[in-house]
Image (tube, rainbow, N blue to C red):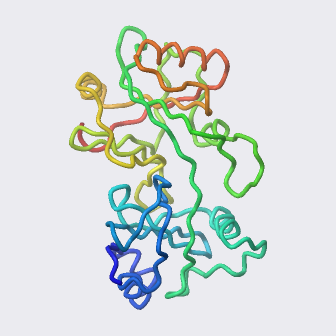
Amino acid sequence: MSSMLDVSDEVRAEIGDDEAAKLLAGETLPERYDCTSCRTPGSAHSERTSTVLFVGEETAVLAFAHAGCIPSQIVRVSEEQIQSAVRTISGEADSSSAAPATTPGIPELAYERQAVLGVTCGQVLIGDQLHPAIVVEPTGPIARPGTTGGNDEFLTLLTESGFTPVTDVAQRPGMLPGWSVLMAMGKLHAVLQPAEEGQQPVSWWQAHQPLAVTDEWRATVNKTNSVVVYAAPVGAIGQQAREDLLRDALDKAAASGVLVAATMPLAGTS
């Protein structure tokens, strides 16, 4: 059975023409996959699908995603993350079974387990000026990559990446170098984080489908050309129906010491 698979030139160059041909013919595809972006089921035999190759220092892991979520691409991750994903899928403690990235034709067919991040857009009054804001809250605890413990490391990981703790929402957080918020055609697409030197920025959060924003939010972002990105652990903010309720939740999270933030430039066009 043929597939509806997209293999980008960069992925093809990494896995080799022979393996790419087998994938496109459907010979080495699983019947179903979990989208590596949105985590919902998919089938390359019945819907447009992207190949996503996670590449570490020594190991490559091939995964799949809905074409509407992310394009076919190579994602650079740490070797520790790769080995953890392979152990999770194979159930083996010995990582030597993973296929080296330099060996074409035999990538591991695995699915990296990614946390689901919920995103809410709203405007926040800082001083006497409205600022466009994004509030990120995961649906569950976030463990440190490569660990199996149940500790929630979400805020710690973000502060290590440059986010700063918020004690007063009325103060604008500083700019975070290398990060940006991607918009196109009036919709929110992703929050981008820096990649390794010489590489393009990669998605820290990627919308399953481009996220519509209000006309007021777009008008404000056109004035500031930047977005304030807040983040809090699961259960700290919740789904708020109005911007005043969202502000109250942010104030409470800040008072409880469970809110971090950064200001990011706008990438693309609003």
Residue 149: percent from left, percent from top: 78, 49
Residue 261: percent from left, percent from top: 53, 29
Above or below, comparing residue 112 to residue 10 in the picture: above
- In this view of the protein, which residue sits in the foreground, 64 or 223? 64
Q: Residue at x 50, y 29 (%)?
A: 230
- In this view of the protein, which residue sits in the foreground, 207 or 202? 207
Q: Quadrant of residue 26?
A: bottom left
In the picture, the quarter occupied by the C terminus is top left
Q: Residue at x 64, y 62 (%)?
A: 81
- In this view of the protein, which residue sits in the foreground, 153 or 30? 30
In the picture, the quarter occupied by the N terminus is bottom left
> Among all residues in the image, which is located at the extreme bottom?
18
Residue 82: percent from left, percent from top: 63, 67
- In this view of the protein, which residue sits in the foreground, 266 or 155? 155
Above or below, comparing residue 32 to residue 37 in the picture: below
Residue 121: percent from left, percent from top: 39, 29
Q: Residue at x 51, y 59 (%)?
A: 196
Above or below, comparing residue 51 to residue 238 in the picture: below
